[in-house]
Amino acid sequence: MTINDAMRTYRLPNPTTAEDLECRWSKVLDFGDKVLLAGYYYNGKNKPCYFGAVYEHLDDDLSCEGTIGLRSASEVAFEDDGHAMAWAMAHTED
């Protein structure tokens, strides 16, 4: 999924901070120099509704207040947040 599509579909902020993501979504993980997100997006009754996203730091501030930018987001909807986070972990190098 393109970054613009992910921002529009999942309403992902770009750029943002890890602190802002943690206030809006409950599944945010610092993973090396990346920030990973497993989010929920309603796709319809009985359909997979979780997605994964990878953010990267845009400056040298690696704290929760440093600026991060969206790097990638999954097109695939997952059954749970664990699979969405696994997708994000696997796509940190894309």
Image: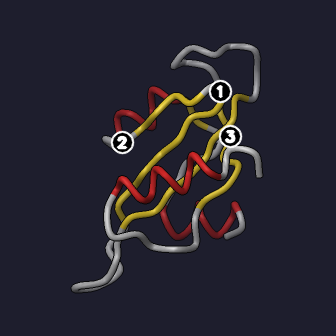
Q: CA distance from mark 1 to mark 3?
A: 7 Å
Question: Mark 1 or mark 2, which is nearer the start of the sequence?
Answer: 2
Q: Which mark is residue 93?
A: none
Residue 46 picture location, percent across and down: 23, 85
Residue 83 picture location, percent across and down: 41, 59
Q: Which mark is residue 69?
A: 3
Look at discs 2 and 3 and give the one toward the viewer: 2
- Disc 1 marks which residue? 67
Q: CA distance from mark 2 to mark 1?
A: 18 Å
Q: Which residue is more in the foreground, 93 or 47?
A: 93
Callout 1, which amino acid? Thr
Callout 3, which amino acid? Gly
Q: Is label 2 in contact with label 3 (beta carbons under 8 Å)?
A: no
Q: Which residue is more in the foreground, 64 or 79?
A: 79
- Vertical position of residue 54 compared to residue 64: above or below: below
What colouring method underlies this structural image? secondary structure
Where is residue 61, by image quadrant?
top right
Residue 51 picture location, percent across and down: 46, 62
Judging from the image, what secondary structure is the residue with disc 2 in? loop
